[in-house]
Amino acid sequence: MAWRDLAVAPQVVLVDPKQAPEIPSGLNLITDKKGAPYPVLKWGGYMYWPLSYIDNRSSMAIVTYDADGNLAFSWSRDGARYIDTIQVDAANRRVVFVGQAGHSFAIDWDTLGVSYSMCYQATASDLLAVAAEYGLPLTNQDAAALAAALPIFSCANCGMGAAAGSAGSRGSARTSRCARK
């Protein structure tokens, strides 16, 4: 099993368009269904907003915001405009953005994962479970001491999107939010 196999699938959430973050210049918040909730992709603490261009081109910008509403990353994709639905294709590890008249484009998880990051700190319970799985002797006291001594695992991208530097344009720089509690 590789780290990429541990990825949690993105979720599609429907949001009131009035709750949208600040939209970058040249883009619009337009759906194919006027007045409907706006489909947004939520993944790894980020919200991916599919936005249309004001010049009505047959393209969308997928604009990613962090939990604080800061622009983190964006992509431009041809093939569809005016978002209708977002479909998560877990079997093929991609997200399909469907727009006006059923036109669509897909972005794979590795590309979307450019914005994904996570932090993990092992607990004594985690270590006891691993020791039990492998038949290793480990006391509660030793597990607690080991958990306190282990570093926090910080994963920015987890090996996903290794060549993603050209996938879009970076907004504000990401910083690690991992901190020992």
Image (tube, rainbow, N blue to C red):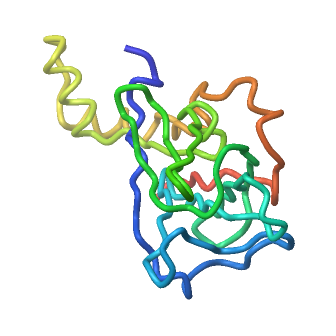
> On the rendered structure, is 178 left or right of 54?
left
> On the rendered structure, is 147 left or right of 84?
left
Rendered-image quadrant of the N terminus: top left
Q: Which residue is found at the position 56% from the left and 59% from the top?
A: 100
In this rendering, the answer to whether 116 lies above or below 134 is below
Q: Position of residue 4 (x, y in %)?
A: 47, 25
> On the rendered structure, is 122 left or right of 127?
right
Q: Which residue is found at the position 57% from the left and 45% from the top?
A: 117
Seen from the viewer's position, the closer of residues 132 and 8 is: 8
To which quarter of the image does residue 116 belong? top right
> On the rendered structure, is 146 left or right of 49?
left
To which quarter of the image does residue 83 belong? bottom right
Seen from the viewer's position, the closer of residues 99 and 19 is: 99
Q: Where is residue 85 in the image (x, y as percent from the top left)?
A: 45, 58
Q: Position of residue 42 (x, y in %)?
A: 47, 57
Q: Position of residue 151 (x, y in %)?
A: 53, 36
Give the residue at the far bottom of this rendering.
Answer: 18
Q: Which residue is found at the position 70% from the left and 55% from the top?
A: 60
To which quarter of the image does residue 126 belong? top left
In this rendering, the answer to whether 16 lies above or below 42 is below
Give the residue at the far front of this rendering.
Answer: 101
Q: Which residue is found at the position 39% from the left and 36% from the top?
A: 89
